[in-house]
Amino acid sequence: QHHNQQQNRFISKYISKSAKKRLPLTTKRAGKGYYKGNGATKEGRLTSKGKFIVDHKRRLELMVPDLEGFQLKPYIASTASKVPPEIRRRPGQVL
C-alpha cells in the first residue's frame, strides 16, 4: 500500500447553480449561439465557400515614429532608483 502518494481532491461535475454562476463564462457553458473569440478585430470576411478574403482597409496599421538619433533605450536598469529625483532627499537637506 502506497500512502505517500498525493491525494487528488474529488471535484463533482454536478456543481450547484450558485457555484456555476461564479465560474467564468466559456463557450462550453453558454448556449448554442455564444461565440467568445479572442477579442481580435475582423480584418476581412468569409465567403460562402469558407475562404477568407482580407480587406486591406481593415488591416492593422502600426504608426512607428522615425527613431533616427533617438537617445533613450527601451528598458530601465534594475539599479535605477524607484523614487523620482524631485522627492529624493540629499544628505543634509532640510525639508
Image (tube, rainbow, N blue to C red):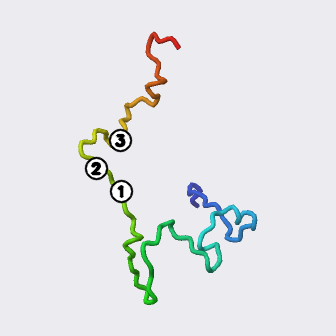
Viewer-closest of 57 and 62: 57
The picture quadrant where one finds residue 12 is bottom right
What's the residue at 35%, 35% (across, down)? Answer: 77
Against 87, residue 72 (above or below) is: below
Q: Secondary structure at mark 1?
A: loop
The picture quadrant where one finds residue 50 is bottom left
Give the residue pinned by disc 2.
66
What's the residue at 36%, 59% (across, down)? Answer: 62
Of the two numbered discs 3 and 2 in the rendering, the one whose residue sits closer to the viewer: 2
Against 47, residue 57 (above or below) is: above
* Label 3 – label 1 distance at C-alpha: 21 Å
Which residue sits furthest front?
A: 57
Residue type, mark 2 in image: Asp
Against 20, residue 68 (above or below) is: above
Circle 1: is it few (<14), some (14-19), or many (20+) Cα within 10 Å?
few
User: Which sits earlier in the primary sequence, circle 3 or circle 1?
Assistant: 1
Give the residue pinned by disc 1.
63
Q: Secondary structure at mark 3?
A: loop
Of the two numbered discs 3 and 1 in the rendering, the one whose residue sits closer to the viewer: 1
In x, y percent, where is residue 87?
49, 24
* Label 3 – label 2 distance at C-alpha: 19 Å
Give the residue pinned by disc 3.
75
* Label 1 – label 2 distance at C-alpha: 10 Å
Which residue sits furthest bottom?
A: 49
